Amino acid sequence: MKAMKHFFFALLVLIPFSVSYGQTPSPEPVTQLLEEGRSTLQMAKLEQLRAMLEPCANTVNAGFECRYQLAQTGYYLSFAYELQKQRGPGQKALEKALQCALTASRQKTDSADIHSLLADIYARKIGTYGDMFTGMDCGPKVADENKKALALDPNNPRVQASLGRQYLMAPPLFGGDVHKAVTCFNKSLELNPQSDETLYWLAKAYGKLNDKTDREITLKKALALNPQNVLVQKELGTLP
């Protein structure tokens, strides 16, 4: 009996060490893969990145950055699956991204970036994978997360871009305003002129305003900055 007690005590001591520590991936390959995955939406690159990050992010002592990057990966994976018309896996990837982002937001409450990412994930749940009830549940969460992000860092280009997406995608009845979206995207681009991603969303806003000239100019500017941007290629009709 005494030996059994020692055995269980040893398990209690050893188990936390077996699950609490994961090797943190080197930042350079992760950053590069995330950028390539975001641009090309190649499933293989994004799945490779997810496989690199999950052992670190799913441990008890995971760092904020690891979880934040894994949440970003899942967010972009949902776009990749959408392009392949795979609704189920895309929805699953987005849900995993949401859970990871929520954990990261509790870990670092003063990060404007994580609140903006949460707003984007909730908005995507509504626009791509949701129904009326999803909108009722997630719509207020989009606004709440963007409000938190704006209070923390109004001069963050990601914060302004996320707010722009909120105005762009929400129905007018629930605060949607395409002109406000354009203002937010332009402010984001003043802070970071090199963001082909924000230029893509600005072009989407011009499209909603039926401004074909500015839409095309903006898309071509985005493509010049990043010829690999698949969503821009799709909008221009040049996607292979």
Image (spheres, grey):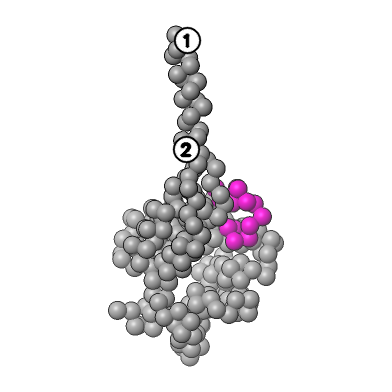
Which residue occupies 46% across, 20% down?
8
Residue 219 visible in this rendered orientation of the protein = no
Q: Nearer the viewer, residue 62 or 164?
A: 62
* Residue occupied by mark 1: 2
Amino acid under disc 2? Val
Amino acid under disc 1? Lys
Q: Nearer the viewer, residue 158 or 167?
A: 158
Give left or right: position of 239 versus 127. left
**Which disc, if any, is residue 182?**
none
Q: Nearer the viewer, residue 33 or 90?
A: 33
Is residue 15 on the magenta stretch? no
Residue 180 in percent (x, y) is at 61, 76
Task: Give the SS element for disc 1.
Answer: helix
Which residue occupies 46% across, 25% down?
11
For residue 86, above or below residue 55: below
Residue 69 in percent (x, y) is at 50, 58
Which residue occupies 33% across, 79% down?
239
**Which disc, if any, is residue 19?**
2
**Label 2: few (<14), some or many (≥20) within 10 Å?**
some
For residue 54, above or below residue 186: above
Report the span colored magenta: 103-115
Quadrant containing the N terminus is top left
Which residue occupies 48% across, 16% down?
6
